[in-house]
Amino acid sequence: MSDDTLNRPSVHALLADGTTVCIRSVHPGDHDQLQGLYEEMSPENLRLRFFAAGRRSAALAADRACAPVHPGYRALLAEASGRVIGLAEYDTAGGKDDAEISIAVADGLHHRGAGTLLVEHLVSAARAEGITTFTADALSENHEVLRLFADLGLRTSRHFEGPEVRCTIHLDEEDAYLSAIEARGRSADVASLRSLLRPDAVVVVGAGRTPGSVGRAILHHLHTGGFTRRLFAVNPSATSILGVPSYPSVSALPKTPDLAIVAVPAAGVPAVAEECGKAGVRALVVATAGLEHTHAQALLAACRTYGMRLVGPNCLGISNTDPALCLDATFAAEHPRPGTAGIAVQSGGVGIALLDGLSRLGIGVSSFVSLGDKYDVSGNDMLQWWESDGRTDLALLHLESFGNPRAFSRTARRVTRRMPVLTVDAGRTDAGRKAAASHTAAAATRTMTRGALFTQAGITATRSVGELLETAALLHSQPLPEGTRVVVVTNAGGAGVLTADACAEAGLSLPPFTAAMADELLGVLPDGAAVGNPVDATAAVSEEQLTECVDRLTRCPGIDAVIVALVPTAVAAATGDDLVRALTTAPARRARPVIAVRLEQDLPVRLLPSVGGGTIPSYAEPQAAARALAHAADRAAWLARPAGLVPDPGAVETERARTVVEEYLAAHPDGGWLDPRTCAELLACYGIPQIPWAWAETEDDAVLAADRLRGFDGRVVMKAHWPGLLHKTQQHAIHLDLRGDSQVRAAFRDLETRFAGLMTGVVVQPLAARGTELFAGVVQDEVFGPLVLFGLGGTATEVLADHAARLAPLTDRDVHELITSPRCAPLLLGANASTPVDLEELEQLLLRLSRMAADLPQLAEADFNPVLATPGGATVLDARVRLLPRHPQDPYLRRLR
């Protein structure tokens, strides 16, 4: 067993009822508590655990768990408030792949998920050690433990022998297990947030007696917002603040609050947190900013020790507009309007802008959380809350960082199928990547990494708060378009042209009408109307005519959306026609989205009430309307696509690959770029096709290699190699089109002379056939995990920057999108009457690259450039791989930040 596995740090996680426990390795000092765990069990539970009710078993079990560590054995305990409440162990008994497992949970704490949580952590530890199967013996009447194994989400089998049953649990990494972990985590997460977002009593610690303090402002909002439950203040110098009873300390309160709002000076925050924890408070919102590192550590330690969820520090506060609660614990200027949008932001300024914008639009807010420095509660938590709160139908996020992007992605993929999830893509720049060594690292900008996360999760990513609100207005008020086909209708030709241009720039299409549809529109519009696309209804169009035109267009089978661009005219004023009313007087909601553009509108976006119910979005700028509609079309397309599965590429030798990596890192503890032979061996473990090659360290060896490898036309390529060489073309360390022994010898001598003292040898390859040069690579992002990149390759790959990216592991859907997203995609599909490349082999290569990255956390970078794609296959012509000494981390293991 590796030292890393044995010395894993303790982590905190949530039980099914939302309480916090610590999961950690067993230490010798735990002996008395472990023995007590068993001795306090009822005789019946002792019998079910040990198949006998004798007390001697308790001491033996504690001795075994606390004995000196031996290979193949692992023991984890669950601890709550310093008390051991559960133990789980496995022992391979000298074997390699199989381990015996046992579980014990304290009496009185069953059915709270402690045993399941311990087993999940034990599964993660076992997988890291290469263990593939757990076995467990139980009495057939021990229904609780049998149900625990059956409900894990892992493939299990049972074999009965008299009163006993042997359970076999296969530790395969399957989606069913991840889904089961998700479901358990979601339930526990939501339970833990109830004290935060549905508290029965709230205290504000740090509310001042005079105006100007954050604490007083929050207390004022709670009081004037009509909070329906008990409300207290803590201020040792007052008995009442703003009409709210005040007490000298949290411990002096007549009722233990569920939630404490902390707005005291930074140095006093840890002591307040400790006091709250001892009093039984279940959640903290820390508005205080400027905590030093030691204060921050003490704050989080108190929250973990006492099982309190934490929002902040450095935050604006939280709000839940449920009329039964009316919780507004923020210091925003106004109370949020009740509604259906959930908001989670890291920036208080962005939060205020969204609260104001959504209230003004009439969408309103269901709940709001200013995450601040995000020590604990995160966007992932809030997505799960909104998924289950029964009020939220639109989720808005502003996240500057991600604690666990892969877990966030799985949650977002699920939630996005139920409601739109929108975000402002903050922190798009990443100047530090400009000097990256490899093509892959240079291409893997922060924008590309975050974009891959958002695209795969189905999140609508906007570039500004304004664009976020504009898109939210459309998604809230209109049905999704089935595609990107748009008709523009206008009463002024110039406005129609501007809107049509905006649509084209946003990736929308403006299809022409059929002759029958054109005649139908001419029949309802005034003389002089032009029924191209855009439709110029002229300034003479009446309210009735415009209504009929829009209604007919929304029923037209070749149209997905209608944008109506209007300008006020004297003609309409003289006749008393209200053209805007033509859009809002439909007796029922139209089947396709209808959007207004009014160039004279004072606000960027409004929602116009409709007679038939609902609202119509109206934009001041055509670009805003087109962007919002394009986002809606992207969402509709994402929802229409199947979720995608991670295929098994087959013929993969993962254990052999891990051995290659371990041997290299044993010889190179700091990591580095693999030499050609080790690199080829690693690629061979994953069946990644490479052009034939040979290694040569002398001139004669190079000639022999060339003789052996010459293709149909006798030409070869020679590439110099030395540790650290990355860009061969820039270094002029490559010779192409070599014919005959004399040219091979001359090339070797040239490289040997120019790179004397550096070059360790050369790689000789046959000159490749003609084809399309592509680029494929992966970079292991320390936060996001492995990112796979694909696009146009060759020497111009960085100049042209024609790349797409997706986070591994890739699904079949991801691979398809990777290949079809770059601008070079038509070259692969047979543009200009050319023969398409072998797309199936190209997909296989990307899947194998993804699998290699997912299997090997030590894989820092892999750079395949070029990859030659032809109608007959896809082959790597040049490969570079860099390894770093990293240990695997389970991104889906349940644990708090």
Image: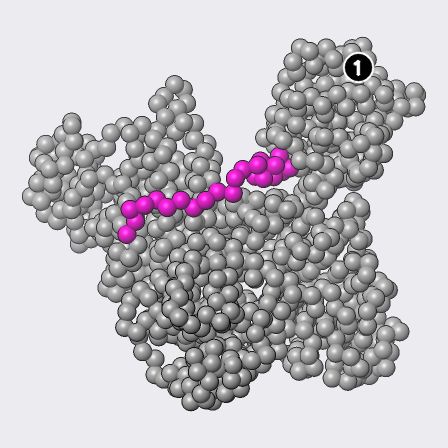
Q: What residue sits 64% from the left and 46% below the top?
A: 418
Q: Is residue 558 above or below residue 254?
A: above
Numbered range of the magenta stretch = 631-653
Q: What residue sits 66% from the left and 50% below the top?
A: 396
Q: Percent position (x, y) of residue 572? A: 88, 22
Q: Percent position (x, y) of residue 685? A: 27, 50
Q: Quadrant of the N terminus?
A: bottom left
Q: Is residue 580 left or right of residue 678?
A: right
Q: Nearer the viewer, residue 149 or 469?
A: 149
Q: Quadrant of residue 139?
A: bottom left
Q: Nearer the viewer, residue 30 or 853?
A: 30
Q: Percent position (x, y) of residue 753? A: 15, 46
Name the kind of residue labelled 1 in the image: Leu
Q: Quadrant of residue 802?
A: top left
Q: Which residue bears the numbered disc 1?
A: 525
Q: What residue sits 67% from the left and 10% below the top?
A: 515
